[in-house]
Amino acid sequence: MDRNRYSAWKRQRGVATLLIVLMVGLAVSVTVAATIYSLRGTQSQQLTTHSATAAQAAAWRGVEALRLYLLQVETSVWPGWVGNDAKPVTGLEALGIRAATVTSVEATGSDHYRVSAQVTGTAGVGNALTTATVEVVYDVVPGSGTPGLPPVCASMPKAPMVFNGNLDYSGGKLDVTNAVNYENIVVAGNLTIGGGSTARISGCVKGDVSLTGGGITDNGHLYSEGNIRIHGMGNPSGTTLWARNIEIGNGVSGGNYNAIKAGAYAVAVYAGTQMIGTAEVGGRLIPSTVTGGTPWVTGTVAPLATGHVLITLTDQSQFLLDFSRQDTAGAAMFKVDPATGLVTGTASAERLKGAEDVALPEGLSLRSTRIAGGTVGLATLTVGQLWGYNVNVTGWSGKYETLWASGAIAMTSGTVKNLLGGGNMTVNDVAVSGSGRIAGSLNKNLSNVQANQAGTSPGLPGIPYCEARVKPVDADNFLGMANYAFSSAGGVAQLTIRNVKRANGESIDGVYPLQNPNAAQLAILQELMTCNNSNDKGCRNVLQRDGSWLLHGVGKMPAGVLWFDQSVKIDGTSTDMLNSVVVRGCDDPSQTTCGGNVTFTSSGHRDFIAPNFAGAARVCGAEFYPSNLCASRSQFVEWEGPGADGKPQTYQGLPIANTAVIAEGGADIAGWELRGSVMLGKQLATSGATVTIHGSLTVGSNQTADTTISAGGISVDVPSGGGLNLIPVCSGGSGGLPASPASASVQWSRYL
């Protein structure tokens, strides 16, 4: 996201994050537990008009939350809900909702219902506690299609490491352990790994790849939308390379590769007889449509029904065909007719760019106009499948199970089992042990190979699509979940405590002025935390002159979510910190002094552990505990979300508590081990010893951020099971089946 768009988005963001899970069924009691749904931008006009107080604002957030919930109730449930029995809705405490109750449901026609409810919001604590109750009537028409889901703010990261920018790695460690079933690393720019690096990677890159050091994880892969050039690395085993063009220098010999493939057809996209855009696709040319001689270039492409195809329309709108997508019956969303090349289902393609009212037509055909990339050059390797347009093998004694080239083949030496070529072939000392056919000429007789064979073009593999999109980090979305919010007004520091209780259940919520607390507040602050090597009891002097925060010599810090309105530096600890740190920047991130950064210095320290990683016994059983994270003194709250198989799964511990750091700015980390994921809006800098992160790392969520690492390095250890790898980032949700969409609107309301 560019800076101007981000600034506008920050100004327009909504005022709350809703914690709900949709429990749709015939039960009388409706429970809305703690899955996180973003309400950014969905607040009704009534919220703007009526929210005269914080309590009223909370009540109206609950009104909107309840409206979204009613949209999801299946049609078959409504008849059983008709009546005046109260249906309580729970789990909205993080929104400031004390109570929300559906008081009656009345059928007002065929599949039409009048729903009455009461929502009570609260604000303040103690003698300053205020409440506001709204009585509201909704008009609800259930949908006949499958209900959709609002965006869920609990997502798997795209990879254990995501860099939204260029990554230049010349020294130290770059390592991912325990990753299963998805990329180890995603880079939205170019990836450069220099000599001296011990990096071992597997993943995808949107730009070019240059390797003169490090290596590729055994049984891993390296995909690039650009070019891959390798002139030095450790020999891999079971690796796949896939890119636009691939060059492997003479200094890289040996190693075992499952596949090395490159190249695509550059196509004009047609809806009927009208050309509407362009794309680059893998597949084969349909022989009856080919024009021109060998090697084949122009004709209608029957695309591979795998991977992704990015289509750019003439108005520069972009759409993505993901051939792994399935409909509700489990059938492929996009289908290819192998005889004609017609691709159907395209009206359901995901729009990446362009006006909301623009969609792809249903049914597209693809006409090749030229070759995109496809050059593969290497020396001596062992490869299962070698596939490109023009393939050049310069080394001696390599082994190639399958060699496919839609264009020319030049081969000095090696053994090939199966050979298929769409152009001419030049060889020196080559043996083909299986069958071989080429469309063009052969410079010398070669056993088991037939030249001048019609229709032998093997097609092209396409160019991989690297899914590197990131969602912005917005610290304000997490303010309602923060247990300890450090902020300043006019240079005066204050600490706002929310959802914190003593072991005996007594709440200590409130606003604590750090400079001039009263006696009772001072006593609580001194019980909670100490800084400056115990010389600052209560951490009352942590605000710096520039508005940033300094936690120096931390000797005591309560478990929970820490929120800061500006940059924070953690400089030495003598205790384990069982926290998630959230850091806010300014509304215009283009400012050089925008802040929002987090620094972990090289001073002596203990462990930094996110609450869910610390465990319920240490977090919930402490002298002070975060009641929004804990269901009891020995157990985290539970919430329901989709599991890895797409089926509902119950998780313990809110996703916010899986994170060690969420910062709108960048991070400078000197050799720490962080147990919890790290999400950065800007850049990352490391120094000293290796930085170890248990969870995932995302760099550049709010703007493109190039990363250069020359020492120390990063190691990411992926947690297994229990939902610890989930991060609090919204997914796109699900639109369901739109045959007859549900509607729910506020018809009438009043304050009680």
Image (tube, rainbow, N blue to C red):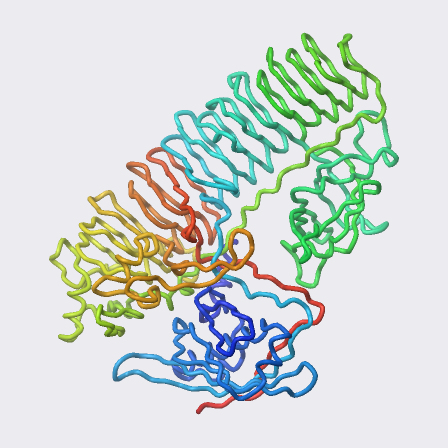
Q: Quadrant of residue 110?
A: bottom right
Residue drawn at x 78%, y 37% as measured from the top left: 369
Q: Is residue 436 left or right of residue 515?
A: right
Toward the right, the furthest residue is: 288
Instruction: Tell me if residue 678 can be seen.
Output: yes
Residue drawn at x 59%, y 35% as measured from the top left: 226
Q: Is residue 628 left or right of residue 17?
A: left
In the image, residue 350 above or below residue 225:
below
Residue 313 percent location from the top left of the image: 72, 51
Toward the left, the furthest residue is: 535
In the image, residue 710 above or below residue 748:
above
Toward the viewer: 399 or 421? 399
Toward the viewer: 13 or 221? 221
Q: Quadrant of residue 241?
A: top right
Residue drawn at x 71%, y 11% as measured from the top left: 427
Q: Is residue 89 left or right of residue 567?
A: right
Instruction: Tell me if residue 484 can be seen.
Output: no
Residue 571 percent location from the top left of the image: 22, 49
Q: How many marks?
A: 0
Q: Is residue 148 left or right of residue 51?
A: right
Residue 191 percent location from the top left of the image: 50, 35
Residue drawn at x 28%, y 83% as measured from the top left: 128
In the image, residue 11 above or below residue 122:
above
Which quadrant holds the C terminus?
A: bottom left
Residue 573 percent location from the top left of the image: 20, 50
